[in-house]
Amino acid sequence: MQYKRAIILILVLFLIAASIFYIVFFEKEKKIAEKEVIVKGEEIFLPLPSLKGEMSVEEAIARRRSVRSYLDKPLTIVQLSQILWAAQGITDTYRGFRAAPSAGATYPLEIYVVIGEKCVFLGGEYLDAGVYKYNVEQHSLILVKKGDYREDLAKAALNQAWVEKAPVDIVITAVYERTTARYGERGIRYVHIEVGHVGQNIYLQATALGLGTVAVGAFYDPKVKEIIGAGLGEEPLYIMPIGVVSRLHELTVEDLASYYEYKRG
């Protein structure tokens, strides 16, 4: 009898010790992973995105504007992480579905990030200036090349100054063959629809974070591909500068009521 009690006591103590070990070590590591950036060589593992924000979808839609003027302030790595996740992040961990819909889940789009000098704050230091590629599966950034290429990108974009002035430029490319291989020529249309979905996600997420952006479609394709080091078969579709704004657009229900009353006569 005493032997059985001793065995039970040992098992209980073991379970208690295991629980304490899990809480102290594994839960601590989990919390760190949610907040901190992990750098392994030339890959930066981004902090986990938030699934709850301070601004509703309705408010973000109402306050969204194309913004071409930004304050001389850096983005935080948390803001950049959130925007990249909103653009192409995983939203179904079983099937790998992403934040924006894709015809047949063919996912033809690739995301590049052009970052300026001291333009993304990590907390005590800054992310190196350079061109990075977003790794969707691991929610990370892979360094393509170091250096501040915003001026070069602005020149390639017909000297649109906001491309150079923004701390970060997102460049979206497409590998059309991924979609046209399944849908033929109609796949081209599907790719263009998809990049529109992604662009709007970026617009709304930036607005919800108190940031601004604008969709840029005027640029010299070959030069942009050269600057970002685009992969084989990739064609650039969008450049979206991201920056801190002094204030967001305001809209009230009263404004809408007055407008509709006037239009309705």
Image: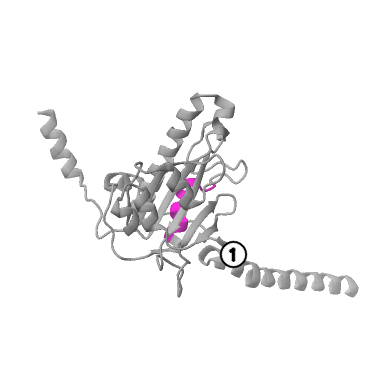
Residue 199 placement: quadrant: top left
At x 43%, y 53%, the residue is 83
**Mark 1 surroundings within 10 Å by alpha-carbon count, few (fewer than 14), some (14 through 19), many (20 or more):** few
The answer to whether one can see residue 102 in this image is yes
In the rendered image, residue 21 lying in the magenta stretch gets the answer: no
Q: Residue 78 at x, y = what percent?
A: 45, 62
Of residues 29 and 75, the one drawn nearer to the viewer in this rendering: 75
Residue 4 drawn above or below residue 113 = below
Of residues 89 and 178, the one drawn nearer to the viewer in this rendering: 178
Image: magenta residue range: 79-90
Q: Could you tell me which secondary element the residue under label 1 belongs to?
A: helix
Residue 260 placement: quadrant: top left
Of residues 72 and 16, the one drawn nearer to the viewer in this rendering: 72
- Where, quadrant-wise, is the C terminus in this rendering? top left
In the rendered image, residue 84 lying in the magenta stretch gets the answer: yes
Q: Residue 175 at x, y = what percent?
A: 53, 38
Q: Is residue 69 left or right of residue 172?
A: left
Q: Is residue 216 left or right of residue 140?
A: left
Q: Residue 118 at x, y = what percent?
A: 40, 68
Residue 87 drawn above or below residue 39 = above
Q: What residue is pinned by disc 1?
A: 30
Majority secondary structure of the magenta segment? helix
Residue 44 placement: quadrant: bottom right
Q: Residue 12 at x, y = what percent?
A: 76, 70
Of residues 161 and 245, the one drawn nearer to the viewer in this rendering: 161
